[in-house]
Image (cartoon, rainbow, N blue to C red):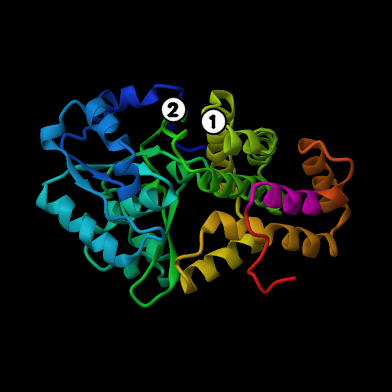
Amino acid sequence: MALIQYITQIQFEFGAIGLLGATCERIGIRRPLIVTDRGVRAAGIIDTVLAALGQAGTVAVYDGTPPNPNEAAVREAVHAYREGECDGIVAVGGGSSIDLAKGVAVCATHDGPLQSFAVIEGGADRITSRTAPVIAVPTTAGTGSEVGRGAILILDDGRKVGVISPFVVPKVAICDPALTPGLPPALTAATGMDAIAHCIETFLSPAFNPPADGIALDGLWRAWRHIERATREPGDRDARLNMMSASMQGALAFQKGLGCVHSLSHSLGGIDPRLHHGTLNAIFLPAVIAFNQSAASVRDEEKLARLANAMRLGSSDEVGPAVRAMTERLGLPTGPPNWA
């Protein structure tokens, strides 16, 4: 039996950040902890968030999120949450800040270390409705963590694990494309390729979920047409809107499942936290498509043809090479320096 469920409330428009104060009030957050990183704070986005909250004097801010969030940062942010007597979290940033916020939401309200809530440790059943409410405000267009049911975090022992539960899905995602134009071109490109990887990989997943397939194809259609413009023309509102939508759609769809691309990129990200997740996805995606194509069934070939159509390519054989060519045009690496 297929379980199909979508997913949380999404506020999506230019200026949506102005809804933050009323959203906190509606879901009962009176003393929020803002979880973010120093780059987002330096860009002035936290000032915008505080103004939208309208209660700057009662807001705690944790801005120590590392590029690959880890257990030590979870502990620090939990300390800030408890010290501030907070009752909810506003996650502001890319996937790292939003994933960290989810880890804090669990660990601040449950007994036990982060490790005990990892799926690989049987932790999903230990996460309950006591989890602190999270409002997610993405400032990148890539991970889609604002609508995801999981967080990817690095434990003290170096393992990169998933903390997955319906209770960690943000109560509301506030998607405001006006928060993204300041993102550097390289990060716009890398996070955008992350969204493309999500849409492609979840569409190719064998699970039966037609709504997810439709969402993934439309997300790919948007991302493929707008990623270069968003990267080269940061102020292009239409490109920014479509990339943020594609990011959100990719994550809505990957409730269906992902695949080998993410298995590889998460493993390498755990070994070397300096490696950017979206860039790794862009590197691995063409090779995984080629590998899967070599053993494709008739049904798989049909799905590859549908991907090619969404990307306006002539045939399914062009999908992998087109992804690699896009990665090159965006100025991202297609492999480590010693790769051919």
Mark 2 vs 1, N-terminal side: 2
Three-letter code, disc 2: Ala
Q: Position of residue 292 (x, y in %)?
A: 78, 62
Task: Answer with left or right where residue 269 lies relative to residue 330.
Answer: left
Q: Quadrant of residue 238?
A: top right
Task: Answer with left or right where residue 337 lies relative to residue 115.
Answer: right
* Numbered tag placed on residue 240 in the rendering: 1
Give the residue at mark 2: 178
Q: Position of residue 27 (x, y in %)?
A: 26, 31
Q: Quadrant of residue 199?
A: top right
Magenta residue span: 319-331
Q: Residue at the location (60% across, 36% down)?
A: 232
In the rendered image, residue 328 lying in the magenta stretch gets the answer yes
Residue with the most extreme bottom position:
157
Three-letter code, disc 1: Arg
Q: Residue at the location (25% across, 33% down)?
A: 47
Magenta stretch, main secondary structure class: helix
Q: In this orientation, which residue lies closer to the viewer: 295 or 237?
A: 237
Q: Residue at the location (26% across, 50% down)?
A: 63
* Numbered tag placed on residue 183 in the rendering: none
The answer to whether residue 25 of the structure is visible from this angle is no
Q: Position of residue 214 (x, y in %)?
A: 68, 36
Q: Are marks 2 and 1 in contact (CB under 8 Å)?
A: yes
The answer to whether residue 226 of the structure is visible from this angle is yes
Q: Quadrant of residue 28?
A: top left
Under circle 2, the secondary element is helix
